[in-house]
Image (tube, helix red, strand yellow):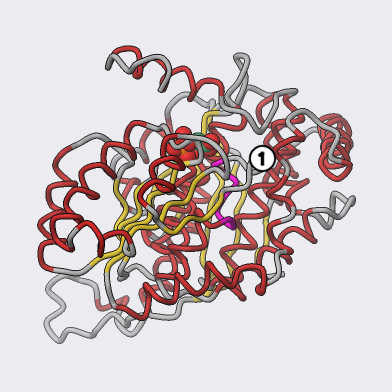
Amino acid sequence: MSIKYDDSNLLSSFRQKNLNKFRPKTIESLNLLIKRNGEGNEFLGWLDLPNQKIDELSDLIKVGNEIKNSNNLLVCIGIGGSYLGAKAVISTLKPKNNIRFIGHHLSPLELTQLIDELNEKDFYVNVISKSGTTTEPGIAFRIIREFAEKKYGEKRAINRIIATTDAKKGALKKLADQKGYRKFVIPSNVGGRFSVLTPVGLLPIIAAGLDINSLLNGAKIGLKNSMILNDEKNIAIRYASNRSILYSIKKKIEILASMDPQIHYIAEWWKQLYGESEGKNGNGIFPTSVDFTTDLHSLGQMIQDGERNIFETFLVIDNYSNDIKIPFDNKNLDGLNYLSGKKLSSVNSKAYEGILNAHIDGDVPCSTFHIEKLDEENIMELLVIFEVGVALSAYNLGVNPFDQPGVEAYKNNMFELLGKPKNK
Ligand code: PA5
């Protein structure tokens, strides 16, 4: 187990009666998940994904490798769960990469810049939408498709476009069938935000050159450990139960705090996972995130001294693959020679300790996830712990973790405002 969770600071401040209430409640929630008889159980396909066999993924691996070996860019078009999992894994593990993400907003600025880049470089396109009807990726795909057809000709463009969508329904499925694009299916029993281990996440991850064997290993470890019906041994139970206790004592905002901007998109993925799963029926902890030490110089004051309705969960990397020493300077005009010879990682680690202690002193309940080092196995173990954690936490709250009626509301409003014909 390479993910560790240090909640000692929380436990020492919790009342025993809270622990006595929420630990057993969380174990009950885990039982609902294990027996698959809780609310939303038609969307539990994500629990099977860590145990997929590599041979079952051979088509996906073939296409992913074709893209990787071509040295082309891959333009991934998708929003929400159809983009954040791949973005989180790839940007964390391979920040310099051949994948471009678009279709997750409506701003023309990024899309026009991407088109400039695509004028210079060859590219494949992976359009990803479970419903096949979401406006943002739909528009981006129409623009990129037209560009690809102009650049490569309509026939050659077909082989460069891959659609990842529902097996049976949606405009994207219809379009892909008619055009003859290669297709991958998003299982109907897996919701968008739980889909990183389906073709939604795996195709871009393989195309970026990451190792999916290790990724699946990490997922298996994360899942196995998260299914243990023992609150001491199971991080997902402890994390979910701590969240429920904190919410019950009016801590309504959770800040996921990282010390490394490279893992920024893990937090973006986590925000979607927790926000969409829990924010229902007037309930839910508001998930937000900060990158330290950057955000100490903006939100630090509020965290230290603002309204005491927040708690903080740190994400800390214990070992770095790249590090740098602070040099000695004869003149020492900046007064920093007291740090010379130290590695930047050790200064970052002291910063973490300093922040943690200051925030605990400022009455912010804090706990920490430790990632032993950044690799496929550890990142996927962490993501699976968070997935199980949110299911437990939402069941504790009494809400269905697996639907997102609020997201559908905005989509429907937008369709109406844009005058979308009713039957499309
Ligand atoms: O988690 C979810 O279900 C949502 O965030 C969706 O992933 C998001 O709205 C995109 O939907 P679609 O894949 O249907 O385009």
Quarter-wise, where is residue 80 in the image? top left
Q: Is residue 288 visible to the viewer in this orientation of the structure?
A: no
Find residue 258 and report its horizontal and vertical position in percent: 45, 54
In the displayed structure, 135 sits above or below 339; it is: above
Find residue 399 and report its horizontal and vertical position in percent: 70, 24
| Label 1, residues with CA under 10 Å away: few <14, some 14-19, many ≥20 | many
Viewer-side residue, 83 vs 235? 83
Viewer-side residue, 202 vs 109? 202
Viewer-side residue, 353 vs 408? 408
Residue 195 part of the magenta-drawn span: yes
In the picture, the quarter occupied by the C terminus is: top left
Viewer-side residue, 274 vs 50? 50
Query: For this view, does 411 lie left or right of residue 9?
Result: left
Quarter-wise, where is residue 108 in the image? top left
Residue at point 54%, 26% (across, down): 309
In the displayed structure, 281 sits above or below 152; it is: above
Give the magenta-colored segment's residue range. 192-198
Would you name the residue on which mark 1 appears?
390
Q: Is residue 138 visible to the viewer in this orientation of the structure?
A: yes
In the picture, the quarter occupied by the N terminus is: bottom right
Residue at point 88%, 36% (across, down): 28
- Name the element at disc 1: helix
Find residue 285 and report its horizontal and vertical position in percent: 58, 28
Residue at point 29%, 40% (across, down): 298
Kind of residue indicated by mark 1: Val
